[in-house]
């Protein structure tokens, strides 16, 4: 987990968004990386911390990782919910982990004029987004994340210490375990959206 999902999620908060205590964040997609964005936001005492997803079981898990509010975008208008929650000012940071063009546009629109939209989901190469660029003149920023700009040799030892102190949840992210002979079954579970983190044992 520390090789990718944890480091990327925490790095998005600490490095890309540079989130400060009391600042707000909305996270679109709370799978493996999203849960760790929530953890990172909790570690810096952000508020509110909003988790948006299509699956209720993932949103329930998100509450255990620090989300203060959850939105099921399959049944609710996420953009309208965020506007009602935070007002016209927008969020200090929004994070897209879906790669979906419509979701990326909603995330950008929910960002304040001095806030940051972080795109970490991988889009289809043919999917484009349309945004209002005018707020960029007032300080709004939009950019892509590359693994949260993590420095593994520096950051992973620090995260291990946080885990030892009980401030970082790792085991709780794992919802499924398979041996290598059942790798195809593991892939099927991931595709259904049922999995949090799925661990394969190669022993």
Image: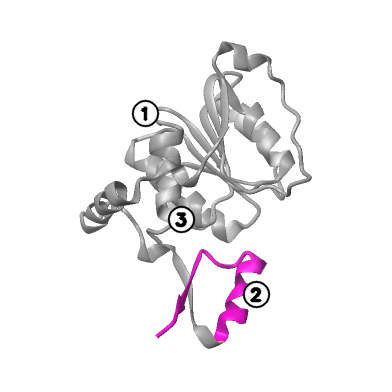
Residue at 74 percent of width and 34 percent of height:
129
Residue at 38 percent of width and 37 percent of height:
14
Q: Which residues are magenta?
A: 182-203
Residue at 40 percent of width and 36 percent of height:
15
| Residue 135: percent from left, percent from top | 63, 16
Query: Which residue does the numbered mark 1 point to in the structure image?
Result: 20
Closest to the observer, 81 or 9: 9
Disc 2 residue crowd, few under 14, some 14–19, many 20+, Cα 10 Å: few
Query: Which residue does the numbered mark 3 point to in the structure image?
Result: 5
For residue 66, say whether it is visible: no
Q: Earlier in the sequence, mark 2 or mark 1?
A: 1
| Residue 10: percent from left, percent from top | 40, 45
Q: Is residue 24 left or right of residue 156?
A: right
Query: Which residue does the numbered mark 2 point to in the structure image?
Result: 188
Q: Is residue 30 left or right of residue 203?
A: right
Q: Earlier in the sequence, mark 3 or mark 2?
A: 3
Residue 112's place in the image compared with 103, above or below, is above
- Helix, strand or loop at mark 1: loop
Query: Which quadrant would the N terminus be assigned to in this image?
Result: bottom left
């Amino acid at each position: 987990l520390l090789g990718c999902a944890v480091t990327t999620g925490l790095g998005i908060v600490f490095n890309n968004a540079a989130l400060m205590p009391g600042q707000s964040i909305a996270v679109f997609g709370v799978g493996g990386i999203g849960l760790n964005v929530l953890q990172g936001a909790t570690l810096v005492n952000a508020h509110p911390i909003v988790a948006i997803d299509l699956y209720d079981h993932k949103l329930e898990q998100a509450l255990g990782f620090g989300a203060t509010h959850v939105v099921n975008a399959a049944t609710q208008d996420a953009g309208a919910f965020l506007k009602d929650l935070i007002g016209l000012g927008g969020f200090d940071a929004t994070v897209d982990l879906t790669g979906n063009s419509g979701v990326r546009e909603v995330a950008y629109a929910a960002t304040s004029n001095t806030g940051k939209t972080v795109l970490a989901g991988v889009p289809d190469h043919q999917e484009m987004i349309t945004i209002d660029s005018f707020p960029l003149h007032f300080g709004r920023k939009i950019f892509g994340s590359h693994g949260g700009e993590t420095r593994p040799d520096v950051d992973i030892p620090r995260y291990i210490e946080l885990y030892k102190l009980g401030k970082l949840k790792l085991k709780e992210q794992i919802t499924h375990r398979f041996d290598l002979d059942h790798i195809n079954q593991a892939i099927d579970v991931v595709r259904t959206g049922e999995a949090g983190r799925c661990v394969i044992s190669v022993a």
